[in-house]
Image: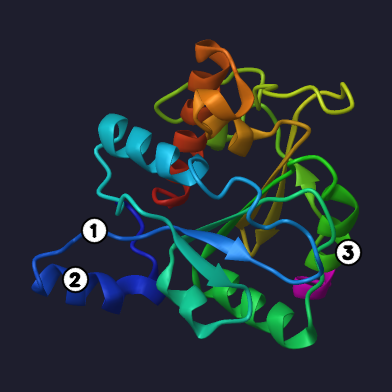
Amino acid sequence: MKRILLLFSLVYSLKSIAGDPSYKIGLLKYNGGGDWYANLETSLPNLIKFCNQNLNTNIQPEQGIVEVGSPELFDYPFVHMTGHGNWVLSNDEASNLRKYLIAGGFLHIDDNYGIDPFVRPQMKKVFPELDFVELPFSHPIYHQKFDFPDGLPKIHEHDGKPAQGFGLIYEGRLVCFYSYECDLGDGWEDYEVHKDSPELHQKALKMGANILSYIFNQP
């Protein structure tokens, strides 16, 4: 890794001493009634397996589940959030998420259809001074091991709008990536869940791998 996140350096050091250099990524559990668990069973585990096989990462095969206001959030270098409905952050949760992201953590929000009306106002609680900006197709997140010259792949139709990738950039570092009208997480699922074609499944996994590759190699 070019960048060893300061926040997790002690965790990594302890694991290395113990002979276990692997790390875990998490699924974000939130309040408000939305289904944070929408892709619980196979989505992140499939992405983890793909990255370990194709990027030579050493991510633990089982995802963690972590609440947005928990101090355990700081144990994860990357957390993924999805769902279809309402998401509400308390002031304490917003503060915890802000500290986590500023310290070096990363949040990927994936629109699973219906979460968009809640994403922007809730993230405004976290970063009142920032707005989501659409990342250009030239952004390095689309050009890691796998090349996506036209940006995010369109996995599911939703409203028929083009897939878009938005980011929150804090002091020059991308701290949150928001995949909108794309549905990467559904594309990571087992075939039996959504019956996606092998081509779409591979596109979703490759773009997910690019996200992880990018965040662990930011300069």
Q: Which span of residues is magenta-colored? A: 124-129
The reply to whether residue 143 is in sight is no
What's the distance in space between the residues labelled 2 and 3, CA to CA?
37 Å
| Residue most extreme to the bottom | 92
Q: What residue does disc 3 label?
A: 121
Q: Which mark is residue 22?
A: 1
Which SS class for mark 3?
A: helix
| Up-down relation of residue 76 to residue 196 (above or below) | below
Indicate the amino acid at tag 2: Lys
- At which x and y percent is residue 200? 57, 17
Magenta segment: does it hold 176? no
Residue at the farthest front position? 192
Amino acid beneath label 3: Pro
What label does residue 15 carry, if any?
2
Residue at 72% x, 31% y: name it. Answer: 182
Relative to 6, 190 lies left or right:
right
Viewer-closest of 161 and 151:
161
- Mark closest to the chain's N terminus, 2 or 3: 2
The scheme the figure's colours follow is rainbow
